[in-house]
Image (cartoon, helix red, strand yellow):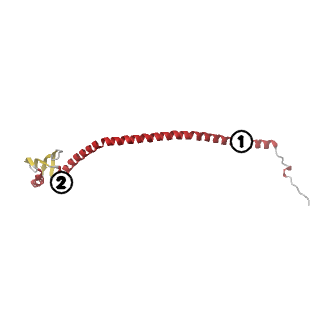
Amino acid sequence: MSKITYNLAAERKVDARSFAFRATLLVLAAMLLIAVAFFNLARQRQRNRTEPSANGMIGRQISDRQRLSVLQAKEIDAWKKTWGKDLAAANRLIGRKSFSFRARLDFLESVFSPGIRIRHISLANESAGRISMAITAQSLKELFALYKKLAPYELVIANETQAAAEVQVNLNFRMPDEKI
């Protein structure tokens, strides 16, 4: 058997200069990529070294703030204990006063009929406080119904004047808080 050999490169020869130039470019590109990788790794290591110290500083600041907030909470609790009784007494007085006025005005609203208007009112905020008022009634029937409702509260009619279609009355009565 005879051997057949094909030489495809016989007509084309490799240009040594072009091959050397391209091989050098590939080697330089590979070296550049390796250098960039080493540079990035070195920079990452440097960043990793500085971050724990920054985290440590932030951690110290956080712990300082927490300790300060705990101290402030203890101080607030101490003030609450010192002022607790005074504050409770003041709140009770405020509650009694607002209850007294509100209850008295609610009572007056329930007693008065739609035909009676209050022109002036003065309230004494005491346990058996006197209420003085000037009212206008459209009819005597409504006025007498009001007198009947206020009779148990020491009603005193100071002045009663009848105009054309209205009756103007100045009256006062005493109403203890227990009856509200």
- Which quadrant: the N terminus? bottom right
Number of labels in the image equals 2
Judge by depth and name the residue closer to the eye, 165 or 116. 116
Q: Position of residue 55 (x, y in %)?
A: 53, 41
Judge by depth and name the residue closer to the eye, 102 or 14. 102
SS for tag 2?
A: helix
Q: Position of residue 10 (x, y in %)?
A: 86, 50
Find disc 1 in the rendering and name its residue: 31
SS for tag 1?
A: helix
Quarter holding residue 45: top right
* Residue type, numbered disc 1: Met
* Residue type, numbered disc 2: Ser
In percent of the image, x 35 and y 41: which residue is there?
78
Q: Where is residue 141 in the image (x, y as percent from the top left)?
A: 10, 55
Q: State how far apart marks 2 and 1 are (Cα).
A: 99 Å
Q: Position of residue 40 (x, y in %)?
A: 64, 41
| Lower position in the chain sequence, tag 2 or tag 1 | 1
Find disc 2 in the rendering and name its residue: 110
